[in-house]
Every structure is written in structure tokens, then in C-alpha cells.
Image: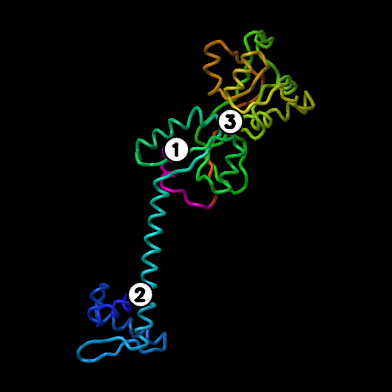
Amino acid sequence: MLELLAAIGTHGSLGAAARAVGMAQPNASRSLANLERNLGLTLVERHPRGSRLTADGLVVAELAGRLVDGVAELLATSTALRERHEARLDLAASLTVAEYLLPAWIAGLRHAHPDLDVRVRVENSAQVFELLAAREIELGFVESPSTPRGAHSRTVARDRLVVVVDPAHPWTRRTHITPGELASTPLVTRESGSGTRSTLAEALGPAASREARVLAAPAMVLSSNAAVLISAASGAGPAVLSELAARPWIARGELVEVPVEGLDLGRRLRAVWRTGEPLSAPAGALLGQLGG
């Protein structure tokens, strides 16, 4: 309706204005009459040679033109913002996922969407949740056994933790160790907040209270899988970390896997995003590629 009124001011007649906005003239006349009734003003003077705006109509038409231009600008800006969001995907992933799984996932996504700008931050699981809550990322990938309120999750892969020692360690001469022994042994471990460390703590909790009473303080705390692997292989102590990270070292004989009797160290790797918010097309495409 405002577009019609602005067009009357531009084209000088109701008929021309109706044609300009794509309305049939009878519909335009009814719409204009309704607007005049609602505003309590006469906006158009009608005469045999056409229609023209009244003094009040000129004022209202000028305001209507500004509103129409503002709506057009709003729509154009919204479209540009939407296109920008659909051309960029901000992710964060915990270290194990980022090192061993995410590159292949992104390669598959980029194959289907070659112009997509994918930006990845590598953090531990706790920091991924912080970035998600702060709206600095749209989608995260974590290894932790639980998710905070406000985060929706979906399992996208499975992994397991393995206990590894250097080839000279006494545990290599045993068929297995017990959960209590593992709980009471100072380990080379990842930092607090990592999914690996929280998964291990949750798995060992019952064993620690039953056999060892308390979890032993770490022998060494490191912030990367590579540092943990190198330290364990150098004899700094047993380590527990992802099979994805340890497998090549075990295959080369630089580390030896030690079974733990009756301890489930399997874990789910999950995608996380904010509850109640629709995912962008790129994020949805990535999740669709991963299944679940």
C-alpha cells in the first residue's frame, strides 16, 4: 500500500501508479480508500483527467517513499548477510578430531562447495563449548563424554582410548593391567578440559574409588597429542590417548599398547551446535555428509 502511494507521487495518477506496482486499478482504488479511511485523511483528489495528491497526500507520499526505500535497503542488506553466512563456515574442533578426522571431512565438503570459506579453530573440548556459547563458531566437534546445557549434539564418529608405554616399561611383560593400577599410576596426560582427559577420568572414577581410593596426580601434563606420544615413547611414563593418534606409533614399535582388564575406554566423537537455532546451509551440508 505504501508503495502504491509513493508511486502516485512519482507518476501523477492512480492508474499509472497501479500499473507501476503491478496492481489492477480497481484493487488499487480500494486499497487507497482503505488507507485514507485508516489515516482519516484525504490523500488523492480524483477528477475526470486523472488523480493527484492533496497537500496531505504529498506529505504522506514522501514519508511512504522513504519507508519503501528503507524496506528495499533492509531486504538487500539481509540478502547480502545471508549470502555471506552461506559462503563461510566457522568451526572449532578438539585436537584429536582436528588432526585425524576433520581435514578429510572438510575436503569432502569443499569438493561439493568449492567456493565455501571454511575457518577452523583448534581447541580442547571445553574451549569448543565456550566458543559455541559466545557465538564465535556455528559448529564444533568434541571428544568429551558430556555436553553443557544449551548445546545440541550428534555422534559423528567413534574412537577409543588406549594405554601405551615405551617398549622397556615393565607393563609390556604383562597380559593386562587392572583399572585400579591405571588409576593409581602417574600418567603423561593432556591438559584439563581436553576430551581425552575427561573421558579417562569418567571411566576411571569407579576404579579409583574402589581400588586406588584417589586418582594419581599426572606425571606430566601436555597440550598436544604429539607431545604426549613423544614423552611416553621417551620413557616419561604411561599415557592414555586416542587410538587414532597412537596407532602409527604402535605399528612402528615405538610404543606398546597395554590392555586394561574390564575397562571400557570407547567414546563417541560428536558435533555440537546451539540448541534451538537452525544451522546454515554449509553446516547442514557438513553434518549431512557425516551422517547420523
Q: Which color scheme is applied?
A: rainbow
- Looking at the picture, which amino acid does disc 1 mark? Gly
Q: Position of residue 26 (x, y in %)?
A: 26, 82
Q: Residue at x 33, y 79 (%)?
A: 5
Q: Give SS at disc 2.
A: helix
Earlier along the polypeptide chain: callout 2 or callout 1?
A: 2
* Mark 3 residue element: strand
Q: Nearer the viewer, mark 2 or mark 1?
A: 2
Q: Is residue 264 magenta?
A: no
Disc 3 and disc 1: Cα gap in Å? 17 Å
Residue at x 34%, y 87% (from the top left corner): 43
Magenta span of residues: 276-292
The answer to the question of whether label 2 and label 1 lie on touching residues, with beta carbons closer than 8 A, is no
Q: Residues within 10 Å of mark 3 (few under 14, many from 20)?
A: many
> Residue at label 1?
291
Residue that sits furthest to the left in the current view? 49
To which residue does mark 3 refer? 267
For marks 3 and 2, the one nearer the N-term is 2
Residue 290 painted magenta: yes
Residue 156: give its label: none
Name the amino acid, label 3.
Arg
Q: Position of residue 37 (x, y in %)?
A: 39, 87
**Three-letter amino acid code of the residue under disc 2:** Gly
Q: Is residue 9 left or right of residue 228?
A: left
Residue picked out by circle 2:
65
Residue beneath the point at 34% across and 84% down: 58
Is residue 118 shown left or right of residue 150? left
Alpha-carbon span between mark 2 and mark 1? 49 Å
